[in-house]
Image: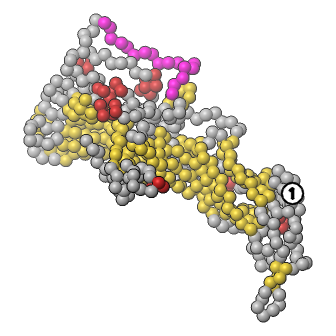
Amino acid sequence: MSIRISLDNPPEFYTNLDFISGRVILVLHKPETIGNVIVKLEGESRTALTVPNPGDRDDFYRPRAPGLGIGGDIVTENHKILYRVFQVFPDDGVAIPFQPGLHEFKFNFKIPLNNICHDENVMSALLGIGGMGGSGFRTMDGTKQLMLRHVRATLPPSLTGFPQEAEIRYYLKVTIQRPGIFKENWRYQVGFKFLPIEPPRPPKTSQEAFARRPFTFRPRGPALHKKPSFFGSRSPAPGSLDDPNQMPPNIEMSARLPFPSILTCNEPIPLRLIARKLAPTTTRDQQIYLTGIEILLIGFTQVRVHNLENTEVSHFPIVSIPQISPPIALFDSPADPVNTEFEVPKTFWADRRLPNTVAPSFRTCNLARRYSIQVLLTLSWGLPASTSRQLPQSITLPLKLSSVEVFSGITPPPELLNSMASADGTGRITVGGGGAQRPPLPQRPSNTQPQRPSNQDPLYPPQLGTVAGAMYEDAPPSYDEAMADQLAGPAARPAYSGVTAENAPSTMPAEKS
């Protein structure tokens, strides 16, 4: 016996509104009786932290990931952010024998926009058993999700890289049930990468977010020259070309991004570096040079388990040039007036795209990711030269833009964009009450229809293909769900790799029952 899942034209990653279709391929070497063939589309956001030990010092009194030598208990939290069930066999709930050979079962799912764990009605309907009549099958126990805190948000991206602490995974799981007390069910699962569509972008403006820092160099002392002596001692040179009484240069450096500050996965950053003169200068000896530059994207992953929280910091280098050759003079002429601005050429970062391991900003029930940009500029007053009698002064100025969002670069379908008014603070796509045309209301059954039977599973009536499913009175969908059901997934997608090994074994500690 062998089982595998074959996906139809799998892309590098899936996104919202995509269809995931494929086949469950079962190869039998002897006759077998099969009851149900169940395919599940699942997504999990799992976190784990160690309870702080009260005996630790105050600076270590914080939650940590398991496996770091801390003696406290490990607590976990698991959110089912995606859960769809499709019963591909049988249609009538009757187990039949299968002959040796190859057998295929087709399935088809559509990835929704938002997570599912926030929906109390759906979670309370999941009682651990599904199906109808005598052909029952196991499902997740949704009552456990009711005891957790949830937010309604767009499905988060696949995320790993924090062993034993946090991960977000998506996968397809197939269960083949074999009737009989001593017969074990057959199971198989395959993972896939997921990258969500981005929320509606705000209209472009001429405003900029900035971080700026002024700096004044120290006044230079008298120049030194070599005395023609055996020991080569130095003494001040009264006739030096460098005037020790001249005013040291005063400059302000600023880093600017369009406001709101939004970066795009696998795209260059729209950064501007501006130098502004704060004090007058008269000679070339007062020239300031840019000799080094470093641009870092810093990611903050907030991990939460119940009332414990921990923040992991990740660094993504964009540009790192410790020595610019030749150095860049920050102003064209020493005679430039005060408040003259000079823009550093963008050639250093214009073609540097964000690393393909950068996930977009997101927020889900127990995990969140936000970003900031840090720019380190090395400035030098003067350059080392063989004829210079003064050593140059150097300083590294840090500039930090602390509120930056990263979007996936997957634009929602135009029909969905036209129906959106704004995005609320949770990252969930929110539909406004503007002039967009609302879809027609779903058809409701009349009062003369019979009530649903008592043995009907309230969660999966349309998929199971039974007569009872046609009599099920389903609740009307929300507006964004109804709109999403009419749309297909986006066509244009950026290159994205991520750090997720979708089929690698999980590193998370086992949950305590």
* Mark 1 secondary-structure assignment: loop
Q: Which residue is mark 1?
A: 280
The answer to whether residue 42 is above or below residue 245 is above
Q: Is residue 493 visible?
A: no
Residue situated furthest right in the rendering: 239
Point out residue 88 in the picture as x, y percentages from the top left corner. Answer: 24, 32
Q: Left of 282 or right of it: where is 315?
A: left
Residue 60 position by quadrant: bottom left
Magenta run includes residue 185: no
Colour convention: secondary structure
Q: Nearer the viewer, residue 135 or 495?
A: 135
Q: How many marks?
A: 1
Q: Give, as a single range, the part of the protein colored magenta.
A: 430-447
Magenta run includes residue 442: yes
Residue 185 position by quadrant: top left
Crowding at label 1, few (<14), some or many (≥20) Cα neighbours within 10 Å? some
Q: Main secondary structure of the magenta part?
A: loop
**Residue at image coords 83%, 67%:** 285
Q: Left of 346 or right of it: where is 496?
A: left
Point out residue 20 in the picture as x, y percentages from the top left corner. Answer: 36, 37
Q: Left of 237 or right of it: where is 311?
A: left
Q: Is residue 513 visible?
A: yes
Q: Identify the amino acid type marked 1.
A: Pro
The answer to whether residue 193 is above or below residue 113 is below
Residue situated furthest top in the rendering: 448
**Residue at image coords 63%, 63%:** 321
Residue 139 position by quadrant: top left
Q: Nearer the viewer, residue 426 or 5?
A: 426
Q: Left of 314 or right of it: where is 286?
A: right
